[in-house]
Amino acid sequence: MIRVRQPGMLTTVQDLGRHGLAHLGVPAAGAVDRRAFGLANRLVGNRQGAAALEITLVGPELELEAGVWVALTGGRVAADLDGRPVPMDMAVRVEAGQVLRVGSLTTGLRAYLAVRGGIDVPPVLGSRSTDTLAQVGPARLAEGARLPVGDQTAGDPFQQVAPTPQVDPEPILRAVRGPRDDVFTEEAVRALIAEAWTVTSSSDRTGVRLDGPALERRRRIELKSEGMVEGSLQVPPDGHPILFLANHPTTGGYPVIAVVVGHDLPLAAQARPGTRLRFRFVSLEAARAARP
């Protein structure tokens, strides 16, 4: 068991999400930065989808009741084990009774803490992820909670420092036009890629809300609700786009001007309020062949 002494600002249990239920209105949820999440699990020798902790801005304080390997990845954060610094991006051994403290992130927005064996909370609809939109799955961490450790292992811990991408201070996200770009003026479509957009403080796991020039519509029409995918740039009536992340709703009635390439979504997941980001259009073929 892991005992939560302090939960941090927003610490949740996440895995790869509950897929295949969008037709029932259930979001996928899961880790927002899947690249950092996957690295953390690989470092401790877990299976790919083992549940880990997603930490937002300020981390938790945890007491380990048994010896276990852990790994911390994602946005840069200082952590200590009984007062001794804990390095990021490598497996670290924690002994029974020791206390792991994760501080405030200095770059990026989210960090991931994997425990060898995974966090073994009961799955709901096939996933252990906390869904902050539909309130499905385990509750966010709270003081005094106890988290069981499972047996989702697949190899040995990796005790060397893994190369990890740095958090880009002004990321450029590749995107494909449409499917509703025809609703907007050409000036609005050009502005989407010409301007730098600022991440607002109202962003969350559902989506990144962006501030910048209002994107004007060519015509005012009411759309029927359509299926939404992660990476959609939906534009509400105020003209300011929302970039949907892992916990996005399954449907939406506002037009989608573009869809961000999946491989670039980890960059958006680490964009804290105040970050400026840009978009660059690519072809559908280039998007399908894209790599980070």
Image (tube, grey):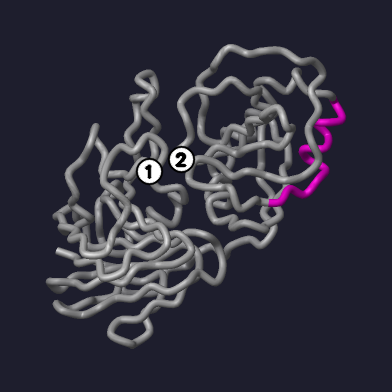
Q: Position of residue 53 (x, y in %)?
A: 33, 57
Which quadrant would the N terminus be assigned to in this image?
bottom left
For disc 1, the marked residue is 30
- In the image as oriented, which residue stretches furthest toward the bottom? 84
Residue 154 seen by the camera: no
What amino acid type should be assigned to the residue bearing mark 2? Ala
Task: Tell me if residue 180 comes above or below residue 5 in the rendering.
Answer: above
Q: Position of residue 180 (x, y in %)?
A: 68, 20
From this viewpoint, is residue 49 visible? yes
x, y percent for residue 31: 40, 48
Q: Residue furthest right?
A: 187
Q: Which corner quadrant of the image does residue 158 belong to?
A: bottom left
Local crowd size for mark 2, using a 10 Å CA cut-off: few (<14), some (14–19), many (≥20): many
Q: Which mark is residue 87?
A: none
Q: Amino acid at mark 1?
A: Gly
Q: Is residue 106 left or right of residue 192?
A: left
**Residue interval drawn in magenta:** 186-198
Answer whether labels 1 and 2 touch (C-beta < 8 Å): yes
- Of the pair 288 and 226, the residue shown nearer to us: 226
- The structure residue drawn at horizontal position 78% and vertical position 32%, both measured from the top left corner, is 215
Q: Is residue 95 left or right of residue 264?
A: left
Q: Quadrant of residue 100?
A: bottom left
Q: In the drawing, does residue 142 fall left or right of residue 182?
A: left
Q: Which mark is residue 246?
A: 2
Instruction: Report if residue 261 lies within the magenta region.
Output: no
**Based on the displayed image, in which of its 4 quarters is residue 182 positioned?**
top right
| Percent x, y of residue 214 | 79, 36
Residue sitting nearer the eye, 70 or 12:
12
Going 83% across and 24% down the picture, which residue do you hit? Answer: 185
